[in-house]
Amino acid sequence: MAGGAPSGGSSASDTYAPTRHWLLAPSWFVLGFFTLAPILIMLVYSFLTKEFRGGVIWEPTLAAYDQFFFDRGLFGDADPTLQWTYISIFWRSIWQAGVATILSLLIGFPTAYFIATRPEKSRALWVFLITIPYWVNLLIRTVSMKFLMRDEGPLNDFLMNIGLIDAPLHMINTNFAVQMGLFYSYLPFMVLPIYASVERYNFTMSEAAADLYASKFQTLRRIVLPAVKPGVIAGCILVFVPSLGAFLAPDLLGGAKNFMIGSLIEEQFKGNAGNWPFGAAASMILLTMVMTILLVFAGQQRRAGQDT
Amino acid sequence: MNESAELAVDVRDAVKRYGTFTALLKISLGIRDNEFFTLLGPSGCGKTTLLRMIAGFESVTEGAIYLYGDEIEMLPPNKRPVNTVFQNYALFPHMSVLDNVGFGLEMKGSSKADARKRAGEMLELVQLTQFANRKPSQLSGGQQQRVALARALAPAPKVLLLDEPLSALDMKLRKAMQIELKHIQRETGITFIFVTHDQEEALTMSDRIAVMSAGEMQQLGEPRDIYEHPRNMFVADFIGDTNLLEVSVGEITNGRVLCQIGGANALTCDAVEGVDTGAQVHLSVRPERLTLSDTTMSSESLKGTIVENIFIGTDINTIVDLEGGPQFTVRTSNSDRGNKRIIEPGSPAFVNMETGAARLLVD
């Protein structure tokens, strides 16, 4: 565990305690400067007063959180009612990220399973093929998807040419486009961890299940899935978390109607129109939410781990 | 009904090819009901392939397999009423011992309660009742082995297949499990097909043994028969320790063959079909059927010089350099030491054998 100072431990390893401090220094540096410090800055900023041209005034206030959750009317003097604008953006983000995660799982699991069951020599090639598209910058890939999904884009042309549809499907600026964008952006994060756990899976267990009268589906559900569950959970987290905070796909493919948290936060820090404390507060709320989800998963994992 | 109905498993001209490689060349064998049958051979001889073909994990390239008269080679594994004990057990790590054992019954359609009840009985049979709620990883290797056995026996298969199930256990535990397996086989009355490369294990446990090598069956018979009457050089060499020597065949009289070993040494043994005067053939003699003396005992005593006495616990192996021939190993039981004195290395000695101890091998 990445737990604090070298407390406890076996007596033998205590001999190395002074050296261990120095060996741990790089990790402390990375954790401190790139994780803890930025979060602390955000936390502090979320409790400060906004400056109208961006930036903050160093006066503590709860205004940012208040603005997120409550509506006090146009002049700020009405009785506070629950503010649905931002909560619904959060809710939509969770929904979009959830759909993208499920899509990734449905496509990613068979893909990972397929790769892991290829002969050992060709597996590296398949993994390589999966990752090739991701050498291209995310922005460029998302713009290309916008081009592909346009009303007069190649996808509609193709579908009309094969006679599947008569008129172009309107895909761009819909929830569907955002889901596809998120799904495509993060698919390898689903495939790779699942691949890693399927590769470790002992296929003799599938033979044993078949030997004990289990059908293919029963084998998958009762034996394979429980065994590769850690990979599936890791894949879901790795797709869900960045999807939740994504702003490229929603901005480019979803248009103004399909605003997500990432875009909301991004706007608060852009140009002069922003509201830094509000952006920081939204970030903290997002962070808290993601942490809660991860802790619930981790708790379940630990419980499952104790059983084995 | 046909003749194969009395056989538990009837393998007819089974061939297995992987691309251009032939793993099994036309194997035919009948395994009887209620029999402890062993497929014995070195690794790569095709014994596991044959077992996996019976289980349904490998397709049959040519030929047919019958199970109590029903043709099964086209059925998937989950449709065959046979169960397997895997070499590395393949227990389901996320299930308790009880659920592992009950899995087969549950998949066969028993209710969870019935499956658990029967699983409990099976655990009793293998004496693991108190571990029912543990996970497999919390058990020792020997205990896991018994869970695997209980799991395979729980659905009451018509035939139980065992793929080198004892090879991961240490020697003491392996010996104990050999006896327990044999015991369980008799108690349940289920036909066991056991795969092993360990000839001692095969001799200890089996009713009948099929010795395999290079995708072919070399000999099929009862342990004693195979040990005492090996048909060819492979079987003689693979089963037990033996002295193999090349001899030239001399006169054949009254069904006895005179074999020239070299120098003045010669011996007679039973004639075998296909061996004629003048041929160069191999002869096999088990070391425990030889005795040593410092004077000649009969006309068939072979003259030589003692090279070394090796103490191996229950026995002493004495290596003798035969005059005009190869080295011979003579095994003397330690309990006989009182009667026979040990002859020091370097001393001349005579090797004597019981009649029928030497066997001519066809190939």
Image (cartoon, coloured by chain):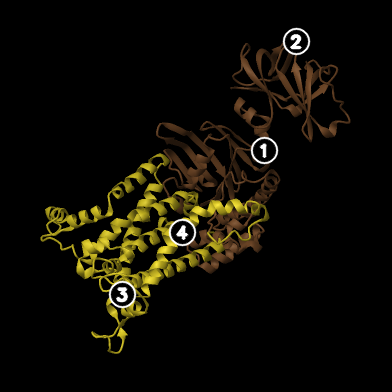
Residue A213 visible: no
Write down the chain letter for disc 2. Answer: B
Q: Of the residues tagged 4 and 3, which is closer to the observer?
A: 3
- As measured in the structure, the alpha-carbon distance from the residue carrying label 2 to the one carrying label 1 is 36 Å
Write down the chain letter for disc 1. Answer: B
Q: Are marks 1 and 3 on the same chain?
A: no
Q: What amino acid is labelled 2 in the image?
A: Ala
> Who comes first in sequence, dot 2 or dot 1?
1
> Which tint was used for chain A?
yellow
Instruction: Give the labeled residue for mark 3.
Output: A50
Residue B231 visible: yes
Q: Position of residue B237 (x, y in %)?
A: 64, 28
Q: What amino acid is labelled 1 in the image?
A: Glu
Q: Which chain is brown?
A: B
The C terminus of chain A lies in quadrant: bottom right
Q: Of the residues tagged 4 and 2, which is closer to the observer?
A: 4
| Secondary structure found at label 4 | helix
> Who comes first in sequence, dot 4 or dot 3?
4
- Classify mark 3: residues with Cα within 10 Å, few (<14), some (14-19) or many (20+): many
Residue extending farthest to the front is A58
Q: Of the residues tagged 4 and 1, which is closer to the observer?
A: 4
Q: Are marks 4 and 1 on the same chain?
A: no
Q: Position of residue A300 (x, y in %)?
A: 49, 67
| Secondary structure found at label 2 | loop
Instruction: Give the labeled residue for mark 4.
Output: A31
**Marks 4 and 1 in Cβ contact (< 8 Å):** no
Q: Position of residue A181 (x, y in %)?
A: 26, 59
Q: Residue at x 30, y 59 (%)?
A: A183
| Secondary structure found at label 1 | helix
Write down the chain letter for disc 4. Answer: A
Q: Are marks 2 and 1 on the same chain?
A: yes
